[in-house]
Image (cartoon, rainbow, N blue to C red):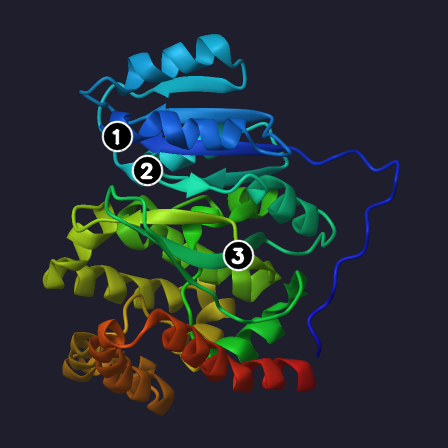
Amino acid sequence: MTPTQPRPPHPFQALPTLTVVMPNYNHGRYLRAALQAHLDQSQPPVEILVVDDGSTDDSRSLVQEMAAAHPRVRLIPLPVNGGVNAAMNRGLREACGDFVCFCAADDLVTKDFAARSVGVLARFAGAAFCFSDLAVMRGDGGAVEPYPFFLSDAPCMLGPADLERLLKRHFFIFPSHTMVYRKERLLALGGFRGELAWLADWFANYVLAFRHGACYVPEVLGSFRRSAESYSARGARDPLAQRTLFFHVLDLLGSDPFRDVARPFRTCGVVPELRLRMLGWLLSAPGRRRYLTPRLAARLLFRPLRAVMSPYVPARLRRAARRLAAAPARRTLAAG
């Protein structure tokens, strides 16, 4: 099945609306730039909800200052720090837009992020979300390196079966920092599961993708700031915590609410990290070994080797290698 190309909207169709939810905890030094990037959109969001999770820096006063000048900005102050998932779920419940995105206070988006994402997602009523190519900022220096997926040459809809075929051949993790969700789909899922901590959005994304499909825009529409002190990075450094969360995901996939997506999770080898320790965890837990397929074992063995070699390869060659690696998956998708 060839990825479905979008049709132009009807000239009298009402424009869909987007709510930006920005969870924040002590990121005042980045907030102004992040908010301004959304205010400067070619298709501005209907509202920007900054859910402040008990910050102790100048975050709240900065947001109030910007809200006074820009009515689209609204501060939602939480009395105590409850964690990023609680903050995102609070924003989701209060969002009035048809679509919603969750952008960290230290992420940045391009000027056409909303227009490009909402434009394609609005044309495919079944899709749960829209995602685009990955780009990473290194620290505070501002240098950005793109990591395109090369899934398609034009914006398209990828149905659940398309994504399953694609992820079997060319595994990737959806970049949450530039994802735009159909609000009703995310609400029906129950938002982000707090007990999954830093794996909550990762889990939700694959469940939604395997149930409803997703739209893809083959462009860099934003970048996230890679930091060793980010919530997910700190969590992944704790092997026991990471293993516990992943095994909880496997338990969820065995429960009635998620049995419908358990098979594609396993056949696609969906895991939160491609590291050798994941292979050890699955092999050492008899009740979890069934999740380990030959496809997943091969990935866990060879991806770490590629990661070690990657810094020594010029960026131009790394990009060419990614395009070459994606070619079989694109052919499989087109022939499906």
User: Upstream in the sequence, badge 2 or badge 1?
Assistant: 1
Task: Find numbered disc 2 in the image and state the secondary structure of the residue it sits on.
Answer: loop
Please tell me which residue lies in front, 90 or 224.
224
Res. 27 mark: 1
Q: Give the number of the disc on residue 42.
A: none
Badge 1 element: loop
Is 285 left or right of 61, judged from the image as shown? left
Determine the residue positioned at 33% across, 16% down. Answer: 62
Which of the two labelled residues, at mark 3 and mark 2, occupies the earlier sequence position?
2
Residue 69 percent coordinates (x, y): 48, 10
Toward the top, the furthest residue is: 68
Q: Nearer the viewer, residue 281 or 68?
A: 68
Label 2 packing within 10 angstroms: few (<14), some (14-19), many (20+):
many
Instruction: Give the residue at mark 3.
Output: 132
Q: Is residue 87 above or below residue 235?
A: above
* Separation of residues labelled 3 and 2 (CA atoms): 18 Å
Marks 2 and 1, how far apart at CA: 7 Å
Secondary structure type for disc 3: strand
Q: Position of residue 146 (x, y in %)?
A: 41, 60
Amino acid of disc 2:
Asp
- Is there a contact, CB below 8 Å, between mark 2 and mark 1? yes
Q: Is residue 311 left or right of residue 40?
A: left
Q: Is residue 268 visible?
A: no
